[in-house]
Amino acid sequence: MAPSFDIAFPDSHFGQPTWEQGEKRLQQLALETLIGKAGIGPDQIDTVCSGDLLNQCIGSSFSLRNMGIPHLGLYGACSTMAQSLLTCAMMVDGGYAKQAVAMTSSHFASSERQYRFPLGYGGQRTPTAQWTVTGAGAALIGATGEGPVIESCTIGTVTDLGIKDANNMGAAMAPAALSTIMAHMEDLSVAPGDFDRIITGDLGKLGKEALLALASAEGLELEEKLDDCGTMVFDLQTQDVHSGGSGCGCSAITLCGHLLEQIKTKKWSRILFCGTGALLSPTSTQQGLPVPGICHAVSITAGGDR
Amino acid sequence: MAPSFDIAFPDSHFGQPTWEQGEKRLQQLALETLIGKAGIGPDQIDTVCSGDLLNQCIGSSFSLRNMGIPHLGLYGACSTMAQSLLTCAMMVDGGYAKQAVAMTSSHFASSERQYRFPLGYGGQRTPTAQWTVTGAGAALIGATGEGPVIESCTIGTVTDLGIKDANNMGAAMAPAALSTIMAHMEDLSVAPGDFDRIITGDLGKLGKEALLALASAEGLELEEKLDDCGTMVFDLQTQDVHSGGSGCGCSAITLCGHLLEQIKTKKWSRILFCGTGALLSPTSTQQGLPVPGICHAVSITAGGDR
């Protein structure tokens, strides 16, 4: 899916002195690209709803320093792209903003040293581990205009089945994904057959298998419809990323690049984008607590007559 | 203002094995108290919008584990109470939720060890430092009912004048507070005289003085109207808290306790509640970066005829 990305950058510092500032630059690049593609000025953006995985979300706040754009900081772990989309959709549909931007990022190197080990330590990764995507995505949500349409959203609940392995986040998030997908289907009176694809954020290979099994046990057959950004964003055969991609940036770049392109080119007419997040911190892990999961669903259509 | 609080707790662990889990328990206590006072069930809360200062906001997410209540995690540093109020107000006014809860917490001990030094180290505090409030507040926002009314909100921008002293957050946040107060006055065509009080979140004694000076230089005289939760929540004469209180919990308990009580008892008919946040992290401080500030304003009235 590489051609669907606007920018590919060979330097993981993005010209900055540290990875954290590189991640800030990543969000700036995403926002600058959005502004350029939309042909608007920063003063035409009423709010940027954004978040990231860094402590105190500094990737987001520092990227917007002195830009003069109102900012709401969000934290939904890797579900943040879906959360920012649905927050923008409520703001625009309710008439509180004419145009709002949903944006998130993640960075492999800044995440590794914050959540796990310093990269220079060279620690081995467990087979269930995922590889945090270094990337940022930004989407402009407006009341008018052409392009894909957000038709409905479901806000998820914090679901915790007691999984304590911080290196198996897919398994920890799968129950939350199932809970939100089932709630969305019931509340909106839709079924998997009403969607071209149901796409989770970053369950990875193992988490996707867990979700399929959990869903099947509830009588919900997702096999033919389910995809996961974590298994799509990397080539699991040739790239050594174990269970797949993860991070806010994983679902952000897959959505803003590949997924929306399929809708814009009318290959798909309706998807359910399900951002998944593992609500752990290094402190909660060190204190022996389980990994709660959350999932927010955003139903996106091609607009016009279906 | 102690009598305006629902619960005062002598144990800073709140019966939990760690301060972080104590902070989680603080939010649970706030939510349980809200549910009891409102006489509703958890299933009548459509969304909890909440956040805190802990890395990855675990105070908020862990407090809602398996509660079955939809959750949007927010991060606005100490401005989070104002951000959660305005997010809930948009959700309810727009028709996306019937009832939503805005909730935040902070904890002195969990904050100190995360942002500064381990408490056992016994480090001296600088004269400009503030004391993180150990407390949580929760407010129920509904489309109908009695009580104070949110009439308008202004979402702030990330403002950074280059202050690099992480122990002088009041000075770092004052420019953001001025920017948002001026934007609110201009956008809503109101003046300080239209409010009984304009109340910032946690500028503290020094930050409040900085805001008064900055505002005066812009021709805005706030002297007679300005209060700050950071200077109200503690007795600065008898309690050794240096420049005053801070943290999400500072503005949350002052608003949900004292401020709303003044409105409910008709002592005040209109306030501008201005949550202030310092968007730093230990990593950004260690990398020599300045402290960006943000401020969100929520205009609250007694409702009915004014």
Image (cartoon, coloured by chain):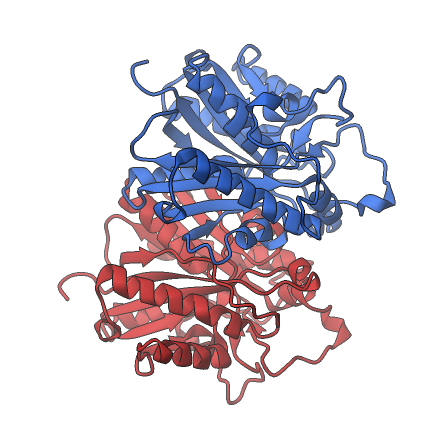
Chain colours: A blue, B red
Image quarter in which the C terminus of chain B is found: bottom left
Q: Estimate the x, y position of residue B117 in percent, counting from the top left.
A: 72, 69
Q: Quadrant of residue B81?
A: bottom left
Image: B2 above or below A304? below
User: Total of numbered circles in the picture?
Assistant: 0
Q: Estimate the x, y position of residue B129 in percent, counting from the top left.
A: 59, 77
User: Residue sitting at 34 percent across and 67 percent down?
Assistant: B181
Q: Residue furthest left?
A: B305
**Foreground residue, B78 or B22?**
B78
Image quarter in which the N terminus of chain B is found: bottom left
Q: Estimate the x, y position of residue B257 in percent, counting from the top left.
A: 39, 69
Q: Is residue B148 left or right of residue A276?
A: left
Q: From where the camera sits, is residue A174 visible?
A: yes
User: Residue sitting at 44 percent across and 52 percent down?
Assistant: A71
Q: Residue furthest bottom?
A: B237
Q: Is residue B88 left or right of residue A158?
A: left
User: Residue sitting at 63 percent across and 34 percent down?
Assistant: A161
Q: Quadrant of residue B121?
A: bottom right
**Foreground residue, B35 or A138?**
A138
Image: A200 above or below B46? above
Q: Estimate the x, y position of residue A182 in percent, counting from the top left.
A: 47, 24
Q: From where the camera sits, is residue B39 visible?
A: no
**Foreground residue, B198 or A108?**
A108
Image: A211 above or below B281? above
Q: Is residue B191 left or right of residue B84?
A: left
